[in-house]
Amino acid sequence: MRILLQRVTEAKCRIEGEVFSQIGRGLVVLVGIGNDESDEDIAWLTKKLVQLRIFDDSEGVMNLSVQDVLGEVMIISQFTLHAMTKKGNRPSWIKAAPESISRPLYESFVQSVEQALGRKVATGCFGADMKIELTNDGPVTIWIDSKNRE
């Protein structure tokens, strides 16, 4: 699994022009699910996401997690995170899992993050054409891949 997270002051997910979900200060998390994901990937990414210290403490140092600051989280499915661009100019998504695999894993990831935080998270609508509006705070944008645990 791959996630691209952005620290935000606010974010909205619109579907067909209507606000589907929104958050204040926290994280927008784009999630790409590949063909070979497991519950282990979900558990590892959940822990990393919830405990990652990327919010400023009183000294202005990134030393607090989204959990520490009681930040909100929005999780959006995004298969394009598995784009392969090595050959040609048209991306291939052959490594992205089909909906029959990715939807249950996405839903499991959302539930896992909710359990870790002890509260609901905002989501998009799986497979929908979504418009995400956000104000990136910092900017802070971080890429995490469960298959490349650096």
Image (cartoon, rainbow, N blue to C red):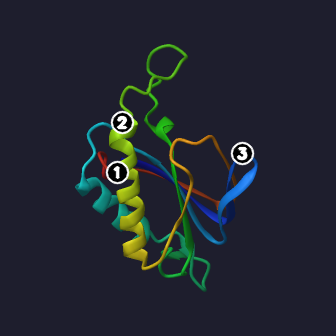
Q: Are marks 2 and 1 in contact (CB under 8 Å)?
A: yes
Q: Give the amino acid at mark 3.
A: Glu
Residue 126: give x, y in percent of width and height.
51, 47
Residue 16: mark = 3
Q: Are marks 3 and 2 in contact (CB under 8 Å)?
A: no
Task: Quote the CA–CA distance across marks 3 and 2.
Answer: 25 Å
Q: Residue at x 35, y 39 (%)?
A: 100
- Furthest residue in direction top, as rendered: 88
Residue 130 visible in the picture: yes
Residue 74: give x, y in percent of width and height.
55, 62
Q: Give the amino acid at mark 2.
A: Ala
Task: Quote the CA–CA distance across marks 3 and 1.
Answer: 25 Å
Which of the 4 image quadrants contains residue 89?
Answer: top right
Q: Tell which circle, 3 or 1, labels the residue nearer the N-terminal end.
A: 3
Residue 59: give x, y in percent of width and height.
60, 84
Residue 97: mark = 2
Q: Which residue is mark 1?
A: 105
The front one of 44 and 86 is: 44
**Secondary-structure class at tag 3:** loop
